[in-house]
Amino acid sequence: MRFDIVTIFPAMIEQPLAAGIVGRAIGRRLLDVKVRDLRDFTTDRHRVVDDVPYGGGPGMVLKAEPIFRALDAIVSDRGSAPRVILTSPQGRRFTHDDARRLSEYEHLVVVCGRYEGVDDRVRARVDEELSIGDYVLTGGELPALVILDAVARFVPGVVGDEQSVVDDSFNRGLLDFPQYTRPAEVATRTSDEDVLKVPDVLLSGNHGEIRRWRKREALSRTLDRRPDLLAGATLDEEEQAILKELQDERD
Ligand code: SAH
């Protein structure tokens, strides 16, 4: 899958992409990411990408033309028509379902705003405007990384074990079950006698019971923390029965 990210701070994108699962996927060519420095698409000697807002007021606005030129260059370089995303706190809230949906495109472009944002005319070439949450950041680089990372997890082969993507929070409208790793007992503090144990069932080797316990924990967490998710959840019969039990217990 191809990604192009348009930014005035390429280093903010390049460094994080080198690490972890995304870095490995780029190395294996499952992801082909190009970071485009917006300044390369200016035509003046000072490589100016921003200007004062029409109508006055504080701050600067990213100019439309360099962004349009960057999009033209991406289309001709890649030879494919991309889906263009503008990062914006005014966009629709980016979700798990968007990540999965966007992973079906062969080519995405993410435009990172800065300052007071981008000239509104840029929207003429934008397919969707996405926000990563109700807060304002200093730029679209972190949102672009968030979107790329979440989308990449749905690209076949990127996450080694596909089952882990299936189990993850939100996938079926449920939060993930709690995870533990060795050792089986840990001291809460170095000086402490109190130890925290792993739930016995996970040490039992009884796979049927472990599976049922995990379902119950996932349902119980979702019920406590994000009951809103349950309305859209797809539950099997066993899960429906467990959910009913949990709801009765809480009543
Ligand atoms: N004045 C603008 C905010 C500009 S913030 C407004 O109030 O709408 C500068 C840039 O950071 C934005 O253009 C956008 O690209 C990015 N950005 C900031 N917060 C964001 C968020 N929550 N989600 C996605 N992008 C965001």
Image (spheres, rainbow, N blue to C red):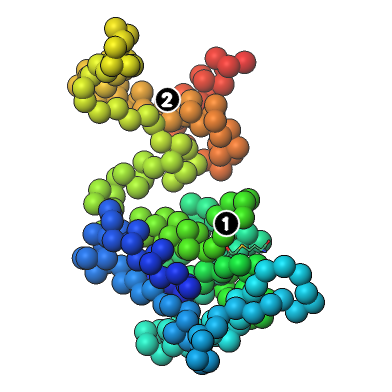
Q: Residues within 10 Å of mark 2 (few under 14, many from 20)?
A: many
Name the image quarter holding residue 176: top left
Q: Which residue is most to the top?
A: 193
Q: Is residue 91 left or right of residue 100?
A: right
Mark 1–mark 2 CB contact (< 8 Å): no
Viewer-proximal residue among 188 and 92:
188
As drawn, the residue found furthest toward the front would be 46
Ligand 1, seen in the image, is in the quarter at bottom right
Q: Earlier in the sequence, mark 1 or mark 2?
A: 1
- Identity of the amino acid at label 2? Arg
Viewer can see residue 2: no
| Place of residue 186 in the rendered image (x, y in percent of width and height, measured from the top left) | 27, 18
Q: Nearer the viewer, residue 9 or 241?
A: 9
Residue at x-position 62% and y-position 55%: 136
- The N terminus, quarter of image: bottom left
Q: Which amino acid, by three-letter code, is at mark 1?
A: Leu
- Residue at x 25%, y 28% (from the top left corner): 181
CB of residue at label 1: within 8 Å of ligand 1? yes
Instruction: Say which quadrant the C terminus sits in.
Output: top right
Q: Which residue is mark 2?
A: 216
Taking depth in this image into account, of 190 and 70 the one nearest to the observer is: 190
Question: Residue 64 in the image: x percent, y percent?
Answer: 61, 82
Task: Report the Cα–Cα distance between label 1 and label 2.
Answer: 37 Å
Q: Nearer the viewer, residue 187 or 234?
A: 187
Residue 146: assigned label: none
Q: Is residue 77 left or right of residue 47?
A: left
Q: Is residue 132 above or below residue 240?
A: below
> Is the residue marked 2 within 8 Å of ligand 1, measured from its CB?
no
Tell me, for residue 137, which label it has, or none: 1
